[in-house]
Amino acid sequence: MGTRLGAFAIVFALGCTGWGCGSSSSDTAVEEQDPAPSETPPEPPGKDDSAVAQGYTIAGPRAWMLIGNDLTQGHDTLELTVTPPSTVKYIDMWIDGAKGTRLKRDGSVFRASASVASLAAGDHQVLLASNGRKTAFARLEFRRSHPVYVFVSNDWDDPNNPDSTLARQEQLHEQHPELKITHFVGPYTFTDPKVTAERAEYLATWVKGLRDKYGDEIGLHIHPWCSFVDQTSVKCRTEPSFAYAEGDTTGYTVVLASYTKQEMLILLGRAKEIFAQHGLGTPTGFRAGGWTTEIPTLQALAESGFVADGSPANWSRMEEWKDVAGSSLYSWCQEHWTVINDTTQPYYPSESDMQESTPPVVPILEVPDNGLLVDYVTGDEMIEVFGKNWDGGAATTPRMVSIGYHPPNFGENFKTRINTALTHIDKYLATQDTGPVVYARISDLPKVWKPAN
């Protein structure tokens, strides 16, 4: 990580040597006599100058001022308040050397409210001088930055999730109050005969509770379990399996892209019916089981109302699968997601190549799983990916980092991994004015990354 701007830097000049020191004229008289702010900014204060002994107090501006978009409100107004010594009659301000403006007096304090909406991403400087002095009493620095979005997800691979893993997910919310999670829920939770109706309803109530309490998203995850597929007119496939050379009679590890576009439309329609029956809402975010999607899958998703897909996989980080006997998951993802890596950003896939964005495109946002899941990356590795996507300075474009986990195996070790990453990420939250980080759900991201006209 590069250096970050934890708070604005302030440097103050000593003494009152300018015109008007000690004047007792009324405010009205001062207004009439004061010269206009200089178009030329004053000299910055010296490194050793201090305002404490002189009685200056400054509140604001923000250290991080976001450049907003349709998802995230920006910080387009610089606001600060100065409480000066009683000898100060007026205070002027210069932003990045532009023409000076005068702070408004409000009793014993002076206030500034200036638009910075036109300022580009980067570091910016404010100089403040009182009573027409040629040297500023303060230099403030702030940073304009696009948001850095962190997308946290989980994949309901199995029909059931143990209570212990549910509790750990609740703990994540308690430990990270800004966190938003996208739960990719599997419809097979409600079709597997081994999951009782009472248990299925309990899981549905649980995930709805997190949605309602924390603002989480309920998306859709499909491994083509036969218990689910058999509820439709589509015949359940048992091969090709990405885990077993001889196939998979449960359908669980079958490559989802082996189902045609028309078959996917039927499966997606049934999944949405199941969601509606259990009050889960209409899903608009998706991830394929094993990240095994292809263009027909994406076309079916778009036609079914989905706006974002989290299937592009950072295959190089799933080396655990590389030498598993009978498995093709590593090679499948390597072949189909060749260009997806630690820093790949959201894009709209071409109709001819789902890794390209050449028009015409499929109208669904591909959100790369660039930080992958805790099954394959440690906390330090997730922090490494985060650092590759944001160097600690002003982001010149919106950025996105994806990390996540599987609820069925979310044990203490995996919780520690993601908790390590989230604790690091929380240091840079925009809400705390310590960075540009914003937690986002997958279906929010198309508000930021929009298709080209």
Image: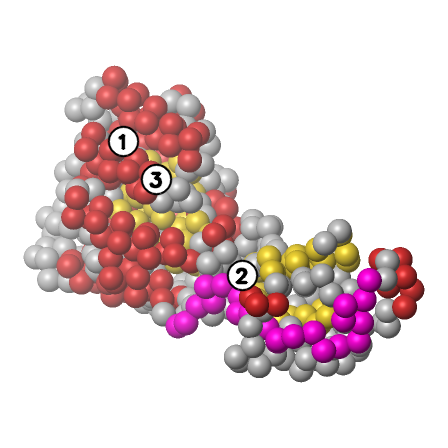
Secondary structure at badge 2 equals: strand
Residue 152 belongs to the span the image colors magenta: no
The kind of secondary structure the magenta stretch mainly shows is loop
Check whether the beta carbons of the residues at disc 1 and disc 3 lie within 8 A of each other. Answer: no
Callout 3 secondary element? helix
Q: Which of marks 2 and 3 is nearer the N terminus?
A: 2
Q: Pointer 3: what residue?
A: 173
Q: Position of residue 43 (x, y in %)?
A: 67, 82
Report if residue 361 is visible in the image. Answer: no
- Amino acid residing under circle 2: Trp
Q: In front: 167, or 222? A: 167
At label 3, which amino acid type do we have?
A: His
Question: Residue at 42% of width from left, 31% of height from top?
Answer: 213
The residue singled out by tag 1 in the image is 188
Residue 133 position in % (x across, y down): 74, 77
Residue 424 position in % (x across, y down): 33, 57
Crowding around mark 3 (Cα neighbors within 10 Å: few <14, some 14 to 19, many 20+) is some
Q: Is residue 137 visible?
A: yes
- Quarter of the image with the C terminus is bottom right
Can you say whether 390 is above or below 186 in the image? below
The answer to the question of whether label 2 and label 1 lie on touching residues, with beta carbons closer than 8 A, is no
**For residue 57, side relative to residue 194 (left or right):** right
Query: Label 2, on which residue?
Result: 64
Q: Are marks 2 and 3 in contact (CB under 8 Å)?
A: no
| Residue 98 image position (x, y, % from top left) | 73, 75
User: Which residues are drawn in magenta?
Assistant: 2-24
Closest to the camera, between mark 2 and mark 3, is 2
Give whichever of 122, 348 is nearer the camera. Answer: 122
